[in-house]
Amino acid sequence: MTIEFRKVTVLGTGVLGSQIAFQTAFHGFDVTAYDIDEAALTAARTRFDGLATVYQQDVAGADAANTAATAAGITLTTDLATAAEADLIIEAVPEVLGIKRDLYGKLGGLAPERTVFATNSSTLLPSDIVDSTGRPDRFLALHFANHVWKFNTAEVMGTEQTDPAVFAAVAAFAKAIGMVPIELHKEKAGYVLNSLLVPFLNSGIELAAGGYAEPAAVDETWRIATGAPMGPFQILDIVGLTTPYNILINGGESHKKLAAWLKENYIDKGKLGAATGEGFYRYSA
């Protein structure tokens, strides 16, 4: 069975969804980006224009002409039926199981039989979602790291029901858009990256929420002691605080307390991370 992907839809145009869409379009694929309303799409267009500038600075071969063409060439839609007309659909909606399952329930009845579904879920297992897709053999996880043009891993993880040919095709697609495919042989919550990263970030939050040290002091300690370029709170600002909040709020009681601290001290005050100009740190435009 030959599986080819030319038309790709990305569901969700937040920080990571917009990056996935731009990276895919930059490498020559026909890309549609879907979100729930016009306000979200307006924000997405701003993100695409910003990514055009970033690519010119960071990506070999990127220039004003091809990045502008990439941004302009991405089709934006609020119509899920239009979004479903793709060979591959990459879902990057909020990290809430109910939202994802509801979306796949609708999508399964709209997308052609050939269409492959891939979730970019950070911590949920594909098997948590698969029965809502209506196509268990054509569903798997494709997980990207933030700043996809720079931290270019793409973790590929299926369920026991994923067709091996689908798995191989998605891994090949990841390579075609400039990613390094990381193939997982069986399901693991958090894949490779977040199995290492999430406990690290949670430990940083615990230190600050417990009043042991300020975020900047935690970051400084980590940078000096390990030689790492960033500490946990600098990473959290890049990721955006909504994602770790959604992960924590669905955890145990200790994690829920950390989620409440994030919400009260940062999220409720509009401090959502670097993309909004302020999180644990302030950022210039």
Image (spheres, rainbow, N blue to C red):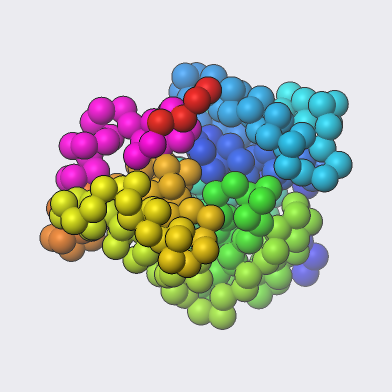
Above/below status of 41 relative to 233: above
Count of numbered tags:
0
**Front-most of 215 and 256?**
215
Could you tell me residue 41's position as x and y percent?
54, 24
Q: Quadrant of residue 152?
A: bottom right
| Left or right of 133 in this view: 6 | right
| Left or right of 90 in this view: 173 | right
The residue range painted magenta reads: 260-281
Q: Residue at x 42, y 70 (%)?
A: 195
The residue at the far bottom in this view is: 185
Residue 269 included in the magenta stretch of the image: yes
Above/below status of 177 relative to 136: above
Could you tell me residue 198's position as x and y percent?
38, 62
Q: Residue at x 53, y 55 (%)?
A: 229
Quadrant position of the N terminus in the picture? bottom right
Residue 142 included in the magenta stretch of the image: no
Above/below status of 30 relative to 257: above
**Front-most of 39 and 206?**
206
Could you tell me residue 83's position as x and y percent?
60, 36
Could you tell me residue 106's position as x and y percent?
45, 43
Q: Is residue 11 visible?
A: no
Q: Residue at x 66, y 75 (%)?
A: 164
Q: Residue at x 45, y 50 (%)?
A: 235
Q: Is residue 261 visible?
A: yes
The residue at the far front in this view is: 224
| Left or right of 194 in this view: 218 | left
